[in-house]
Image (cartoon, coloured by chain):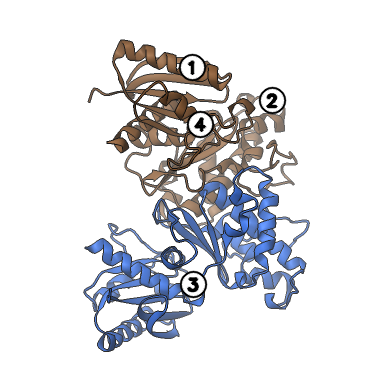
Chain colours: A brown, B blue
Amino acid sequence: MSQLFGAIEAGGTKFVCAVGTGPGDIRAESRFPTTTPAETMAQAVAFLQAQAQIHGPLSAIGISTFGPIDPHPHSATYGHITTTPKLSWQHAPVVAMVQEHFHVPVGFDTDVNGAALGEQRWGAAQGLDTFVYLTVGTGIGGGGMANGKMMHGLMHPEMGHMYVPHDWERDPFPGVCPFHGDCLEGLANGPALEARWQQPGETFPPEHEAWLLEAHYLAAGLVNIITVVSPQRIILGGGVMESRHLFPLIHREIRHQLKGYIQMPEMDAGIAEYIVPPTLGNQAGVLGSIALAQNALAQSS
Amino acid sequence: MSQLFGAIEAGGTKFVCAVGTGPGDIRAESRFPTTTPAETMAQAVAFLQAQAQIHGPLSAIGISTFGPIDPHPHSATYGHITTTPKLSWQHAPVVAMVQEHFHVPVGFDTDVNGAALGEQRWGAAQGLDTFVYLTVGTGIGGGGMANGKMMHGLMHPEMGHMYVPHDWERDPFPGVCPFHGDCLEGLANGPALEARWQQPGETFPPEHEAWLLEAHYLAAGLVNIITVVSPQRIILGGGVMESRHLFPLIHREIRHQLKGYIQMPEMDAGIAEYIVPPTLGNQAGVLGSIALAQNALAQSS
């Protein structure tokens, strides 16, 4: 099909916009800093308009964004970023700001749900209907699909803010979450990794205690995700997970912490195919937004 | 409609069987101890056959059972209880054992998913598509619905075995889970409540530290469920939750632990309508099984 889609990946520090149809066919891409909603959204719209002049009309647009957001189409505040600590973006009606200029279906979801959808369409979650995508970077965020639809529920998951046991004896570091201190995000995000050891994560050798502790906490979070959701697979992305030697440490820790309770091959010999890296790499955000656009188009027809 | 359904609630210590159509119309009920699969399932089948003679043919049968189970219709071991510590029930093909005698659709799910479905049809979860039912008794089990279908995924949730922070200073009790020690179930199930204080739970006055600690741990588990699944409501059932004064303690603890992070009325003034007791009471198991039977009939036509 020759339908073309617009993608807006709205991050807290930068926006990435693109037009294309999927992996291997991103026709144009643009990155610019996140400033005010009016300015930044105008830049996004201008980019998409210019690209539509060159490549032809867009059939739909997808927005994947930092949150929290209101993803419920029947809600009065649908399409808004809601109570974000980025004050100027509080209650920004980003979907409406796009629909003013484009009379096409607009898909809208969290950044991590967008990335999850991209992986389900083209990457590591193909064929699955219940899986989790956890991103471990500056923050820790989780999303995914349950029974074939994106995870939303009351709002959307905020998996980084679950509580896991804090091993105070081994790790007196109090955690960095401004709300909760030592929730999963507070103990295991990128800034915690650096603040605890007072040096950048990349500088630790692979066998450093920093990684063992990181794997320990992430595994505890994953055990909780496994016991609560029972996903068919878990994708671990984000900057911290680019240290790929974390994966085998996490695999070992999960088996250790589950202690044989869930007798499935995925929790044992098959765990390396169960907890996996994403396959879309640094295009995950843009491709996720294109997948959201495609879903919006499909649902509108 | 005059369709009649058979219900089998398979518990680890007793079976409850019934025929009926829903709340207020249970035509007959029978309880007997759980012995071997052959003996116990034969009793269940004999009861349903006898009732069908009296009340007319059954349109479908629902089985809600202790687990773990294989709930996936396309799996080779669908309809089995799988790796249960009750050895004689390991790999018992309970659905097939019913279908030998009744040529009608058979619904099959965990006890807690059955109870959740019953609450969605007739009780505290009506109109919801994403909610959790957590039962706190001899064990802690969780289930519910995600995007309008029962939570299954890889297998089914095992929410009791998530990890929550263990407050060793306030609570040196090591926990009772034979697998994990101080997972949520190990810290907060009925046996833990009694073993920690060495007296039966019913004997504590409502302001006893035992209840504060119980609410603290259950709230930590619920915060994890909220952040991972974002349910529209959580139903708390099971023997421990019959101490209804636990509810306001849990409400307070959840607000305390979330620390305002999720800015939704459900996490604040509306929390008493968000974390609620079940409404089907001691018929939850039987009614859940009837609801499973109704779903099986609907899906077969």
Chain under numbered label 1: A
**Is any part of residue B119 visible from this angle?**
yes
Please name the residue that numbered disc 1 is placed on.
A42
Q: Circle 1 — which element? A: helix
What distance separates the C-alpha of mark 4 from that of mark 1? Answer: 38 Å
Q: Quadrant of residue A290?
A: top left
Please name the residue that numbered disc 3 is placed on.
B280
Q: Position of residue A222 (x, y in %)?
A: 53, 46
**Tag 3: residue type?**
Leu
Q: Position of residue B16 (x, y in %)?
A: 42, 80
Please name the residue that numbered disc 2 is placed on.
A199
Q: Quadrant of the C terminus of chain A?
A: top left
Q: Circle 4 — which element? A: loop
Q: Sequence order check: which comes first, mark 2 or mark 1?
A: 1
Q: Quadrant of residue A188?
A: top right
Taking A186 as reference, is A245 left or right? left
**Is any part of residue B175 visible from this angle?**
no
At horizontal 30% and vertical 18% (from top left) the residue drawn is A57
